[in-house]
Image (tube, grey):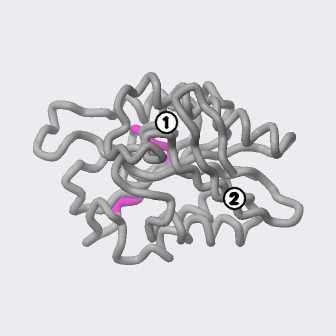
């Protein structure tokens, strides 16, 4: 499904379930796509608990860019595409999430789009080797419960437990969370199952 935004088209890969409990909108990192192993595992686990899942390729990736550019424009596009998806699935509770840069977008826009919960995979706390440039404020500003799943070897750092409703730090995992994607999916689905009601 192609979605028009103020900053170019986005594309949503939608996995529908019969009688969905909620809509879960999920997105990628800066240079990645919606077929990252952890995103596919999260999709599989979320559909198993009754979520209709929309994996969104953001406009900057549709254009072939590897960096999102302006956060303001990225968030404007995100708000527009989520509004479109909500219109397609009226009445469903909403959760959203993403990996890396997508986790930042999910946190920054959470209140504006009216989500009940956010899933932040490999939240990039700071640029590599620049811990003084913390992005913890984005987590704290989400305004809803946030699950953070990070690896203990992530060069982008690991948030503090106090900055999220739940922090899970996976031993031996890096930024790609590629060692046990199915385990990541199970973690996310278990938390969403309890949080979304």
Relative to 159, residue 144 above or below: above
Question: Is label 2 in a helix, a strand or a loop?
Answer: strand
- Please report whichever mark, 1 or 2, sits nearer to the chain's N-terminal start: 2
* In the depicted structure, whether residue 181 falls above or below residue 131: below
Q: Is residue 171 left or right of residue 184?
A: left
In the displayed orientation, state which residue is furthest to the top: 72
Q: Which mark is residue 14?
A: 2
Q: State the extent of the magenta-drawn residues as a range.
A: 163-169
For image coordinates 77% across by 62% down, the residue present is 16
Front label number (1 vs 2): 2
- Residue drawn at x 35%, y 31% is 69
Of the pair 196 and 94, the residue shown nearer to us: 94
Report how far apart the C-alphas of labels 1 and 2 lie in the structure: 21 Å
* SS at mark 1 in the image: helix
Q: Which residue is mark 1?
A: 107
Percent from the top left, x then y, of residue 86?
76, 39
């Amino acid at each position: 499904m192609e979605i028009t935004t103020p900053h170019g088209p986005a594309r949503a890969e939608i996995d529908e379930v019969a009688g969905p409990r909620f809509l879960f909108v999920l997105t990628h990192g800066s240079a990645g796509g919606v077929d990252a192993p952890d995103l596919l595992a999260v999709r599989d686990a979320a559909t198993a608990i009754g979520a209709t899942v929309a994996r969104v390729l953001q406009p900057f990736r549709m254009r072939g860019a590897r960096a999102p550019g302006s956060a303001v424009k990225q968030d404007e596009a995100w708000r527009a595409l989520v509004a479109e998806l909500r219109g397609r699935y009226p009445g469903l509770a909403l959760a959203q999430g993403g990996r890396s840069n997508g986790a930042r977008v999910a946190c920054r826009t959470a209140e504006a789009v009216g989500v009940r919960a956010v899933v932040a995979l490999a939240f990039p706390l700071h640029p590599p080797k620049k811990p003084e440039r913390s992005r913890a404020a984005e987590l704290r500003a989400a305004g809803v419960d946030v699950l953070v799943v990070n690896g203990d070897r992530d060069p982008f750092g690991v948030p503090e437990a106090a900055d999220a409703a739940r922090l899970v730090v996976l031993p031996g995992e890096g930024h790609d969370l590629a060692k046990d994607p199915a385990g990541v999916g199970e973690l996310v689905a278990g938390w969403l199952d309890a949080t979304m009601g």
